[in-house]
Image (cartoon, grey):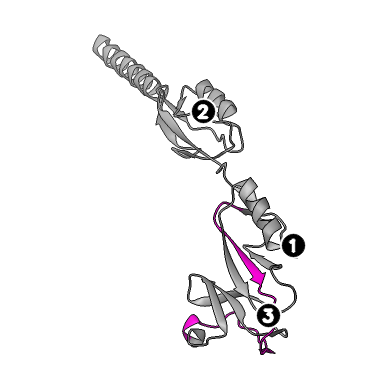
Amino acid sequence: MKTFFGIVIGFVAGGLFFLFVIKLYQDQFVTVPDVTGLSGTEACEKLKEFGLICDKVASGTVIDTYPHPGSKVKKGRTVNLYYENPLKRIIPHLSGIKLSVAEEILKKSGWKYEIIYFPFGEEESKVLAIYPTEGIPHNGTITLLVDTGKKDTYFFVQNYVGMKFEELKTEDRFIFIGRGSRVVGQYPPPNSIAKEVILILGEE
């Protein structure tokens, strides 16, 4: 009988020890909290509450982390924070104004830009359009389409959106912007009268 109780006690003690070891092991790990949408300071404070360390504090908004939210990691692990690009700005409205004014605005705001001249014949040095579209967030180079003021022979503009670059590349009347195999945008729009057409390339 004593042997039986000894075996039972041994099993119980062994089981409790096993549970203790499992609990001790589990206590060393935590789940990475979701800190996206928080400022760098707020994100680091929240990570600290979970026993984690942030790699850097910044004033921007956190848009992602590594390890990702929901991951199981060991306490004391450093979590990398990825911030929203601080250079991302809203493209200003420049269509319809003089090129000199548009350039002054862009230079003062720190934008990089390029100019494509187009013989629309309406008004010399007038900004006809801007790419990418005005009013959207962007952190790259802006393209200005500027009228030369000269009027040349015009043709009836078709809808080229969706057509392949290979089908259009030999035409002298097309000016291509961007990279890609298909036309994703154009200026002037279909049913316009123009001498040349700006075709924006991309991948659909």
- For residue 154, above or below residue 189: below
Q: Which residue carries the number 2 mark?
A: 57
Query: The residue tagged with tag 1: helix, strand or loop?
Result: loop
Q: Earlier in the sequence, mark 2 or mark 3?
A: 2
Query: The residue tagged with tag 3: helix, strand or loop?
Result: loop
Looking at the image, which residue is at 44% across and 32% down? 79
Q: Which residue carries the number 3 mark?
A: 150
Q: Earlier in the sequence, mark 2 or mark 1?
A: 2
Q: Amino acid at mark 2?
A: Val
Judged by depth in the image, the label closer to the viewer, 1 or 3, is 3
Q: Is residue 40 visible?
A: yes
Q: Is 16 placed left or right of 180 in the picture?
A: left
Badge 1 density bin: few <14, some 14–19, many ≥20, Cα 10 Å: some
Q: Quadrant of the N terminus?
A: top left
Q: Is 150 placed left or right of 204 in the picture?
A: right
Q: Which residue carries the number 1 mark?
A: 97
Query: The residue tagged with tag 2: helix, strand or loop?
Result: loop
Q: Are marks 1 and 3 in contact (CB under 8 Å)?
A: no
Judged by depth in the image, the label closer to the viewer, 2 or 1, is 1
- For residue 172, above or below residue 12: below
Q: Position of residue 200 (x, y in %)?
A: 57, 73
Alpha-carbon distance for marks 2 and 1?
42 Å
Q: Main secondary structure of the magenta part?
A: loop
Q: Earlier in the sequence, mark 1 or mark 3?
A: 1
Q: Position of residue 13 (x, y in %)?
A: 33, 14
Q: Is residue 202 visible?
A: no
- For residue 94, above or below residue 121: above
Magenta stretch bounds: 138-166
Judged by depth in the image, the label closer to the viewer, 2 or 3, is 3
